[in-house]
Image: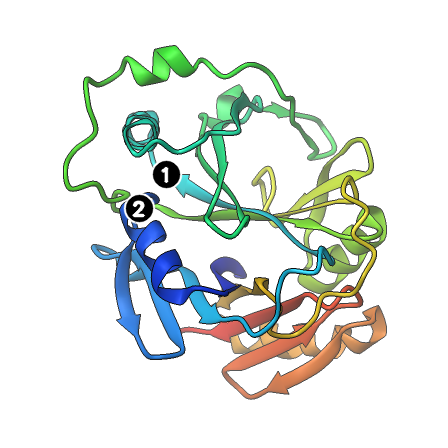
Amino acid sequence: MLQLGPVYLNVLDLPRLSQFYQEVVGLSVLSKTKAQIVLGIQADQCPLVILQQATKEDKQTAGLYHLAILVPTRLALSEVLHHLVQCGVALEGGADHGYSEALYFHDLEGNGIEIYRDKPQTQWDVRSDGRIIGVTEELAAQEIYDMISQAPEPFFLPQGTKMGHVHLAVGDALASSKRYQALLDMQEKHQYAKASWIAGGDYHHHLAFNQWQRRHAVHQDKQAGLSKIGFVSDQAAELLAIASRAPKLGFQIKHQTTRQLQLLDTDGIAIQIDYQH
């Protein structure tokens, strides 16, 4: 089954961004070279964010709206909130989405970050056709904050944390959504205000697309911002099936082996699917 993997970011200042994702976000360095730093959850050896050197400034093209890190409990979200406040992070807001509670901010180069926890599925608004309705309501931030007196020191995101979803800013949200649904065998879970949320199985969304920022220009290789979205599959046949569908849907195959598939969509956004058994 296809699962979301790490998000690859091109950054202009590799050491500075690595420090931010360690000290502010709470990730650990899992491996490091001169050109790439892999950050994630030490206890799980789970990579979440992979930083690479950018060679071009961000051109406000199609690309990342935010990456969304899923913590396992509401208590963990309370720890995150305390830590972000203690670090002086300018939170851009929080929201109760019906199925989740989320905090929003940006890294030092403007990449959007969401850290959230899922509510129990019994509290989700799941319709008979499988759609899962999201809302944007005020977050019970004080209630979450008051769950603990302070964040643990040193601060790390807990075991079980993973990449929950990736939200993209594109030129045509509904067209992009349809392409990715067909490519990855996902279903649309919600659509609202020129935005679409899609997922595999019974999740609320693994990918989202919006055109709120009117980013019609094609994303450029090595440009600061999103480099590629990682996925992992435990079925080699799934990579072959996706590769066979890709050209018909407008995706370019950039690299293909029995263990890895790299694709480029019409907005210049890259995805990488790795076979891990």
Tag shown at residue 160: 2
Q: Is residue 194 left or right of residue 8?
A: right
Q: Quadrant of residue 77?
A: top left
Judged left or right of residue 203, residue 213 is right
Q: Is residue 90 above or below residue 144?
A: below
Q: Are marks 1 and 2 in contact (CB under 8 Å)?
A: yes
Q: Can you give x and y, in whole percent of width and height, for residue 227 in the image? A: 57, 67
Residue 214 drawn at (x, y percent): 81, 46
Image location (x, y in percent) of residue 79: 27, 29
Kind of residue indicated by mark 2 = Gly
Identify the residue at horizontal 50%, vertical 74% (top origin).
Answer: 274
Quadrant of residue 90 within the rendered picture: top left
User: Closest to the observer: 248 or 80?
Assistant: 80
- Residue at image point 56% right, 88% down: 257
Could you tell me which secondary element the residue under label 1 belongs to? Answer: strand
Q: Is residue 126 above or below residue 105?
A: above
* Residue beneath disc 1: 71
Residue under the point 35% across and 69% down: 37
Q: At 34% across and 79% down in the image, what residue appears? A: 34
Q: Is residue 231 left or right of residue 65?
A: left
